[in-house]
Amino acid sequence: MVNVAIDGAVQEAQPDELLIDLINRTGVSVPHVCYHPQLGPVQTCDTCMVEVNGRLVRACATAVADGMKISTKSAKAAAAQVEAFDRILSNHLLYCTVCDNNNGNCTVHNTTKLLAIEHQRIPFRPKPYEVDNTNPFYRYDPDQCILCGRCVEACQNVEVNETLSINWEDPNPRVLWDGGSTIGESSCVSCGHCVTVCPCNALMEKTMLGHAGFLTSLKKSALSGMIDVVKGVEPETGYGAILQVSEAESAMRSHRVRKTKTVCTYCGVGCSFDVWTKDRHILKVAPEHGPANGISTCVKGKFGWGHINSEDRLTTPLIREGDKFRAASWDEALDLVARRLSDLKTASGPDSIAFISSSKCTNEESYLMQKLARAVIGTNNVDNCSRYCQSPATQGLFRTVGYGGDSGSISDIENADLVLIIGSNTAESHPVIATRVKSSHKLNGQKLIVSDLRENEMARRADVFLHPNPGTDLVWLSAVSRFLLDNGLANSTFLDQWVNGLEKYRASLEPFTMEYASRISGLPQETLRTVAHMIAEAKRVCILWAMGVTQHSQGSDTSTAISNLLLITGNYMRPGTGAYPLRGHNNVQGASDHGSMPNSVPGYQSVNDPEVRARFEKAWSVPLPSTKGLDNHQMVEAIHAGKLKAMYVIGEEMSIVDSNANYVDAAFEKLDLFVVQDIFFSDTCRYADVVLPGTPSLEKEGTFTSTERRIQRLYQVFEPLKGCRPDWMIIRDIANHLGAKWSYQHPSEVMDEIASVTPLFAGVNYERLEGYKSLQWPVAANGTDEPLHYTKRFAFPDGKARLFPLAWVGVTDAPNAEFDFHLNNGRILEHFHEGNLTYRTEGIREKVPDVFVEVSPELAEERGIQSGTWVQLVSRYGQVRVRALVTDRVRGRELYMPMNSTESPVNRLTSSHADAVTNTPAYKEASVRMKVLPEVGESPLPRVNSRFGHPTPQNGVEVERKWKRADYTPPGNGLVQLQTKK
Ligand code: SF4
Ligand code: SF4
Ligand code: SF4
Ligand code: FES
């Protein structure tokens, strides 16, 4: 620590701490408009001028040093601050009372007040540009833009989409998109970072405009009149009196605008934020304090909430009558479900019934679902959709290190020296994690290796991009491991101390020579050697992977190969290292953690273990089944075999997202009882006997667990829509109709019960998760959590990790003469999964209206295809008709179809082949033939999609260019007397 004096008072500070942070921490008031702690010094506004040892400096760009004497209020400092702010006001029309940003958090308003500005010395000067309204989600008003550059900093260096810049050399600088495009036609991905950090109303969410204030919905002419009146009285009254009026209006707003913390409902990153609402209108999503995301979001979390108030929401239970459904009361629907379940249980036994929980639902709901299956019905037939994606990754980690979750936190990924991304389109599927990698790569010298079939954004940014033959990652990973061991590049100290099974593992690597790997994977040996050396030389390595690895017939083995590689190079047990299977859905981690698994009760405790069963039997006061139940995949087979008669599915669009969807649909038709709980009449509902209307995340309380094992609370933003019930209530009510006598009145009671029976969550309770507090499991009874696993030992009895020997078997459903194309599939940025939620947001539909199949330029030329040409894809399992998009993201005879379609879902084409260990379908092993149809439509991706933009990378806002302007002088030079309120 060092000592400094601020305005005469001695303060302790961290050496190198930014002066502005120290000043803020000690509660001294110093203006600072462009500084934002999550952006660092931007240095454009000059309002933070203070005197240090007699010299004027910017507090945001000055590091604390021992003995510093800082004056924040000296005449020199005060005059410089006011002069700087005066320049800012010349770029901004102050009309707070009729401004949608007058919510107590406007930096420009608050700084005007802090500096007690009464009159502007430099008059407001409009800029010669129109307001840009071309993005569906936000607009830019150049006249309100103070040129602070926060947005540019956020776009260039936090999000790293590199869309924004400021033309400092122009007589009238402004913020530019792609150097001068409209926002709508730029590379902007609508992540909202810029809007979130804008300190005023220059960038605003369109959902705020005309809605946030009491007077802001007035017609433009009326507003202009009011602004004129304010400007007219300002010379006489000064800003002080005017600000008082606007603050009264702002105070009135606080009575009707609610700010409620929630956790994103889309991907597994776990972004959390406040949702600002007025009645049922969402004013905006405001990220700031989220432990995973800070100011970051992607388009879905920031703007993708159209499903909440969609007119398509189910608002009453439905009961099938013949080919139709009729509305029913809750009592009737619950009675019917309970009676039919009871009858089937009596007639065919408990194992004739199966349950599928939702990875969109809360932990508490997943817990109740598996409790309903086990304790009320008496079956272990319960699963969740991690079976479709994450189970192989979990298996790979169980085999080698002991816990089935990410070994560290997002901050570890950020701090790694080398990141490998394998089979993950991270920039689109886990956008906020991608921002951390992009930023570390751009600014901190982090190295990046990407292995993927497509040249996605991360691949384009990578130092090394590997494009292996489909399904061969295991081969090249094992060859790299063998090369490292053979050449003395493995971490032998780590292996000796922490790892078992080296000899058997080494023997299993025998076939994986570089020559073999190159032949099978198609990757040059030289490239693989480069990769091996990069891994060996990096001090801290993280490997990220996703469904491009797991959704293969050897998904578990490839996940194991990744963990093996990390073990032989000692890349566990330290910050900045480890294994990161990126969880897809917001709560896919939590659904498994909380026991919606056929083989384990919550906390991955085996149903075969008598001690575990005894503990749960005591807690639940019922005998429990001891044999492993059916997983998702086996359930479908069991229906076809006539063994499974009834299913209760929550929030899963199985009819579209299950592999070999035609086969799955045919199974649903055979069920005696099919209960589907959802918020919309999904495709799956078409096969239901009873449909129950649940609620989306904003209408309930509970917790989600993100990819970094982070448990976070979501608070209820809205009352459930009339007629709907939170899913935990529905499960409780079904259990009670079956005689269970569950008395839960709030999800917190469910969490208390979970903690009491699950050592992994022993210390989890709602108090410890209040607000933005979070816990990363395992959580000890005293509340201690574990952001980084394995700091002392691996999760096996002897504390040592295990290398797991592997063999490569080959892929299923490989292309042949009849089906001559490999078909890959996955998510895209704008839509989540099949799109049931995101298609309900109009702006997202504008950016991506429909599904498509990506075709390589060389194939397009060969077959006479252009973007918009209709093609028919036919596999061994089904066919779809879809428009082509010609793009160099794919190569040769490899096609790619995003999942976002209910009309032409890619899973009409995929097979029932599965990973041998987990039964996860081999979605990524599909082959098709393609027929080019005569119709040519418009390109399936409109011009307003960000893919067609042209980013303008630079390092932040480049303030030095501003300082070089002929008309720029630092404030404080040649100072004139300013009118300030004394
Ligand atoms: S990508 Fe678009 S929304 Fe995101 S920070 Fe850049 S300009 Fe703003
Ligand atoms: S638009 Fe950008 S430069 Fe303009 S005020 Fe907002 S954050 Fe600052
Ligand atoms: S979808 Fe994922 S990255 Fe996007 S805001 Fe939600 S949690 Fe964050
Ligand atoms: S806050 Fe320091 S220059 Fe803007």
Image (cartoon, helix red, strand yellow):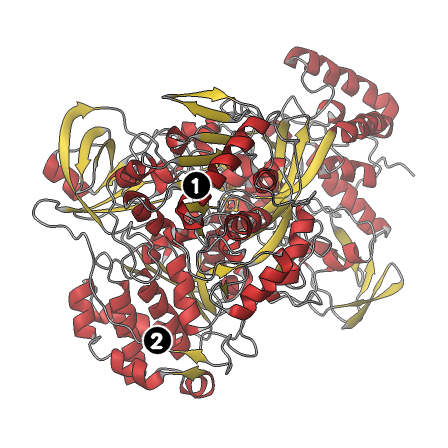
Task: Identify the residue at image location x=64%, y=26%.
Answer: 280
- 767 vs 980: above or below: below
Image location of residue 342, percent across then percent down: 49, 40
On residue 139, which mark appears? none
Which sits in the foreground, 750 or 953?
750
Mark 1 and mark 2 residues within 8 Å of each other at the beta carbon: no
- Amino acid at circle 1: Leu
Most extreme residue toward the right is 982
- 519 vs 458: above or below: below
Say which quadrant the C terminus sits in.
Answer: top right
Whether residue 263 sits left or right of residue 467 in the image: it is: right
Which sits in the foreground, 250 or 544?
544
Which sits in the foreground, 791 or 108?
791
On residue 804, which mark appears? 2
Task: Identify the residue at image location x=47%, y=62%.
Answer: 626
Residue that label 1 marks:
344
Image location of residue 594, percent across then percent down: 54, 55
Q: How dense is the environment of label 1, judged by Cα within 10 Å: few (below 14), some, or many (20 and up)? A: some
Whether residue 561 sits left or right of residue 468 in the image: it is: right
Say which quadrant the N terminus sits in.
Answer: bottom right
User: Does mark 1 have its CB less than 8 Å from ligand 3?
Assistant: no
Whether residue 748 sits left or right of residue 176 in the image: it is: right
* Occupied quadrant, residue 92: top right
Image location of residue 549, percent across then percent down: 33, 58
Q: Secondary structure at mark 1?
A: helix
